[in-house]
Image (cartoon, coloured by chain):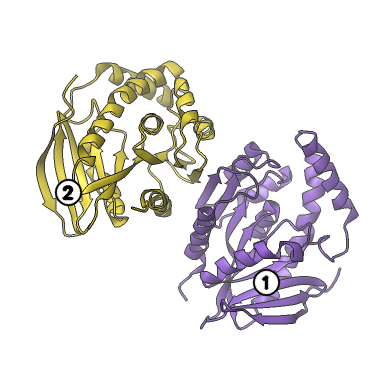
Chain colours: A purple, B yellow
Amino acid sequence: MNDHTSLRFTSEHARDDGIVEREFTLGDIPGILWTPGSAAAPVPLILLGHPGGPGLARIRPRLDARARASAELGFASVALEMPGSGERPALPDMESARDDLRRALDAGERPGEDVIDRLVLPLVERTVPEWQAAMDALLALPEIGGPVAYSGGVLAIGIRLAAVDPRVVAAGLFAGSYVPLRMFDEARRIRIPVHVLLQWDDEGNDRQRALEVFDAFGSAEKTLQANLGGHTGVPAYAGEDAGRFFARHLNLPR
Amino acid sequence: MNDHTSLRFTSEHARDDGIVEREFTLGDIPGILWTPGSAAAPVPLILLGHPGGPGLARIRPRLDARARASAELGFASVALEMPGSGERPALPDMESARDDLRRALDAGERPGEDVIDRLVLPLVERTVPEWQAAMDALLALPEIGGPVAYSGGVLAIGIRLAAVDPRVVAAGLFAGSYVPLRMFDEARRIRIPVHVLLQWDDEGNDRQRALEVFDAFGSAEKTLQANLGGHTGVPAYAGEDAGRFFARHLNLPR
């Protein structure tokens, strides 16, 4: 187990749009922290979930856009390099599961439960403690006050975080079907407000399974927003609706 | 066939909130028109769909709230008494179909296709020409300029209107499963933007059928927003999201 507790900022950039962008390492995990420049009081924090794979540098433009949207709401946001992604050590078992998944999808088949388990469970087990370490470190900064929301992809990571960490008070999730069956019980235990974006024609996703996951959430407030289009075709207004969801739940009276 | 072409205003009330509220008859159909008081130019129009049944007078508070939300966006809105509702002549065949539907639901059964056909098809056949006559009359008023959107319940009426009348440029629909199978082809022909609200735990609705209806819409922009709760439990933020949908599509450059 590496030490994920020491936060070290490696660069700082005050952007023209007022956002302060800092790269950091948390132990050996690279990450990026965006804070709205003009905040007078400690701000809430959004964890920017993403699928990993190509690494933070490659998906930076999309993360930047999400960070800007968060800053416009007055929130800080953070992204971490995922285990096995970018410059982080490869995880051969997960790679092999990912290959099996691709083979199934290329053949037009539904990936088996064992493939989903082998791909997703280790990712959840590894990533959730890293997000928790990031919360420990970042919430200790004077400019970040919480509460925290999880936003975005790898649905199973969002589910686990929402189920286990009370600092996460809302989750804006990207719908997916890659939720191991054994994690449905965790979804049922979730009580925080959940806003789920589902791309109706997402090629890689099983829509029925995605709806079952939504159905399982135990939250008293849960919204599914399904939009026409494939995985990367989320319309701008859907992003804005998700922003309003975070604004409702993170702007707590102080 | 009654004459549904003569519009006659029977009362006018300038409310404290600036909305001008006029009751009218269109031939023998009672209706209510709400217009934002301060509009400088002709305004778009929202058709307020509703399930009928108890009659306009009984559902007036809910209609008022929807009319106020429309006026805040700068739009006029209109409600018509439905065929067979309120003071309008009873329609025994439809009543008998409604009784059969209630019996099926009370028995925990899925209502048969014949019941849905007998209940919904005559309602669509009667109501759509009435809405079209209302558009003819109201769009001739100097203060109403279009475009027109359909909003609300009786999904099948919204589908037919969206499929046949080019004046209707957007539809914000309340999801339901009571769409006759023979109307799925009409849903496939719809090309206007569609925003569908689905109450995830709506007791009287078959969720799977509602999702199939959404899937059928031929629109390039379609959004399904599902929220936890029963038929009357639509959360306030869902109404606001629907409002933004109308604002996007009715505020056309002039």
Disc 2 marks a residue whose amino acid type is: Glu
Closer to the camera in the image, B92 or B170: B170
Q: Is residue A17 left or right of residue A29?
A: left
Tell me the residue at 31%/28% (across/down).
Answer: B128
Spot occupied by residue B20 in the image (x, y as percentages of width and height): 17, 52
The disc placed on residue A223 is none
The disc placed on residue B21 is 2
Q: Quadrant of residue B60?
A: top left
Tell me the residue at 81%/42% (across/down).
Answer: A102
Of all chains, the one bearing label 2 is: B
Q: Is residue B59 above or below residue B209?
A: below
Q: Is residue B53 in view from this perspective?
A: no
Closer to the camera in the image, A21 or B236: A21
Q: Is residue B85 left or right of residue A176?
A: left
Q: CA distance from mark 1 to mark 2?
A: 54 Å
The disc placed on residue A135 is 1
Tell me the residue at 48%/24% (across/down).
Answer: B185
